[in-house]
Amino acid sequence: MKFLFICLFALMSLQLNAQTPKSIEITVIDTVELKTKSAELIFSMEKPYINDWENMEMEPYEDSEYYEEEYEDPEKKKRKNKKAKDEEAPIEMIEEEPITENEYYKSDLERLKNFNDKKSNLLAYLNKNGIVWDSVNIPLTEYDYSENEHFRLKITAKSWDEIKKTYNFCDTMENGELSVHSSTTESIEEHFQKIYEHLYAKAKKEAGIIAGITGLKLGGIIKVSNSESIFDPLFDLQNEMDKIINKTSDLEKMELQKKLVRRTFVFEAK
């Protein structure tokens, strides 16, 4: 009975070894750059404040000393002025030409004309390049909480070329601000062919070195798995920090999004 138990145990051990062949497990990492394909941009420009000179009412001057001087005894006022004149040293006064309300009004109109010209130039440029814009359905942004009146435009750039053209033109507009409301990038699945070719070659090379060192012969792939790490999000954070440190422009930050791809390859070893 004891001999039979030993034989059965040996047979089970042999079957277990046959079901668990030797293998070499390799985890490899690759970085993929995904290009921005389209974006919804928000342009905002503050409208200059224009004074209503025609209907502006001047507030009365309420300085008590002013009124006291107005109704002061003429003789007393004369002696007071003479004493002040004797005590003061002569000062050479430079008379400046006063600015009239018409000149202020003219300046306001010039600023308003400049603002309207910028608006017209932007719309003309977008129309010329076939870039879609909307001045009515504007998504909420931080500018909507501003007290000052703004000209806002939603720009839908359907390609990277349109995004680049919009940014470059808006950079020439003083007091204009362009922000990204949303964007779409290439799908990582579009690059899977190249990604797996590169990862497989890298994993096979490392597994071959290990097999040679241990005296084994490398076989085919048994399994491929996605082996994401809890530290992978730190890669995205580091990528954003690098952009800030390198002082890249908003356009450069938007052009490419880097993603980390980690895969584990299990090779048969004989």
Image: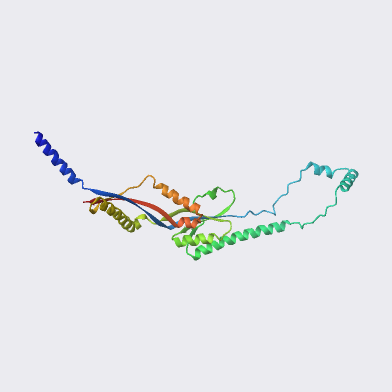
Q: As displayed, is residue 51 above or below residue 125? A: above
Q: How many marks?
A: 0
Q: Viewed as shown, does residue 31 lie left or right of 67? A: left
Q: Residue 134: where, in percent of width, then height?
A: 49, 57
Give the x, y percent position of residue 208.
Answer: 27, 54
Instruction: Judge by depth and name the residue closer to the eye, 195 or 143.
Output: 195
- Scheme of image coloration: rainbow
Residue drawn at (47%, 55%) of the image: 253
* Nearest the eye: 63 or 213: 213
**Looking at the image, is 88 positioned above or below residue 111?**
above
Q: Nearer the viewer, residue 220 or 115?
A: 220
Query: Is residue 138 visible in the rendered structure shown here?
Result: no
Inspect this view and state whether residue 86 appears.
yes
Viewport quadrant of the N terminus: top left
Q: Residue furthest bottom?
A: 128
Where is residue 171 shown, x and y percent of the image?
54, 59
Residue plotted at (54% across, 61% down)? 122
Q: Is residue 89 left or right of residue 106?
A: right
Side (left or right) of 201 relative to 124: left
At 42% from the left and 47% from the top, the residue drawn is 234
Q: Is residue 21 left or right of residue 37?
A: left
Residue at x-position 68% and y-position 59%:
106
Q: Position of residue 51 (x, y in %)?
A: 67, 53
